[in-house]
Amino acid sequence: MLAGFSGNSGTWIDMIQGICAEANANRTFRQPMVEGTAFGGRGGAREDIYCPIGAVLSGIDMILTTNDRQVASLALNCSMPGNGQSAGLLYFGNKDYRPQASGEGIGSFARAGSIKQQCPGGELPTGFTVNFGAHVNAFGLICDRIAYPVAVVPSPPLKTTGHMPPPSPSPAVASDYAFAGGWQTVTGQNGHFTLILQIPNPNPRSIVDLDVIGQFINTDGATQYNGTLRGTIRRGSRTLQYTYSQPGMDSGGSGYFHLTQDGSSIEGVGKAGDTEFTWKGTRAK
């Protein structure tokens, strides 16, 4: 279910991305998470807006800029599931925008000029459509009925006459923060590197993506291959998208690493110009 939005805004909305919450069998919803593709440009300041935990997004009011060029703001209508009682109104973008006859202006919020989008009874927002370029130019909700998962009732244990070993515990799944630390790595071109990754501003309670910085040192003695990288981890994906530079060779490129479920190794693909190479490693001891 669509619970809110993440993106960039200033005078209008420059970029938008969905924040979604999965449904539980008891008709409650899980912690909202940033999901899917970001649409638009890179201008404006970052913000994350979503309905309170336990509430649902039922509709939005949209304000467009002069001559309907961009989406200035979205007012999120949040309500409590079941009784539909309002849980408040939240704003994404410039809530103080007021269309004028010419030019752009900041003034009192023009409620009379809002375009209302409300899901019909029994449905909730499950996605959105968007027109975009350097900015978000138009926005529309996609509504549907929520398919709640079915609660699984455990079967009674089987009675046996013998002794059975206790079930093995499920292995713990590594978090995105397990990327941080040292890695002994090798490329498909047989280059050996010590890779050191850092997450500068860790905040386990945040739902936004994680920024990563790092450096890699060639352990074969070829110092011209040393370099730095910078990237982003999509929360919950265990995937690091990065760009890198090698000042000693005046070159660079991009790539990704995927962290294994147990957090013990990474593997991925790098790209330098038109050349692709594999790059994998294990945690340094």
Image: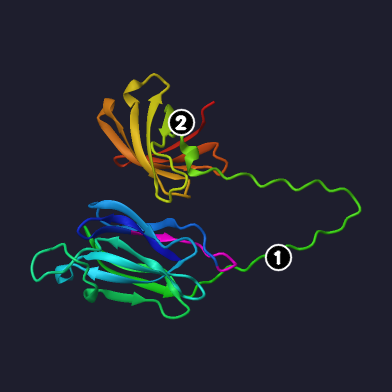
Between 26 and 35, the residue placed more toward the observer is 26
Q: How many marks?
A: 2
- Residue 247 lies, in percent from the top left, at 27, 28
| For residue 170, above or below residue 52 | above
Name which residue lies at 81% across and 59% down: 157
Give the structural element (helix, strand or loop) at label 1.
loop
Q: Residue furthest right?
A: 161
Q: Main secondary structure of the magenta part?
A: loop
Q: Residue furthest left?
A: 102
- 272 left or right of 210 in image: left
Between 262 and 198, the residue placed more toward the observer is 198
| For residue 208, above or below residue 225 | below
Q: Residues within 10 Å of mark 2 (few under 14, many from 20)?
A: many
Residue where numbered disc 1 is placed: 153
Bounds of the magenta segment: 17-27
Q: Amino acid at mark 2?
A: Val
Is 20 one of the magenta-colored residues? yes
- Quadrant for the C terminus, please: top right
Nearer the N terminus, badge 2 or badge 1? 1
Q: Please tell me the numbered disc located at residue 186.
A: 2
- Residue 138 lies, in percent from the top left, at 25, 68
How many angstroms separate mark 2 from mark 1 (CA)? 47 Å
| For residue 118, above or below residue 217 | below
Give the structural element (helix, strand or loop) at label 2.
strand
- 12 left or right of 143 in image: left
- Residue 156 lies, in percent from the top left, at 79, 62
- Residue 93 lies, in percent from the top left, at 27, 60
Name which residue lies at 30% across and 76% down: 116
Q: Amino acid at mark 1?
A: Val
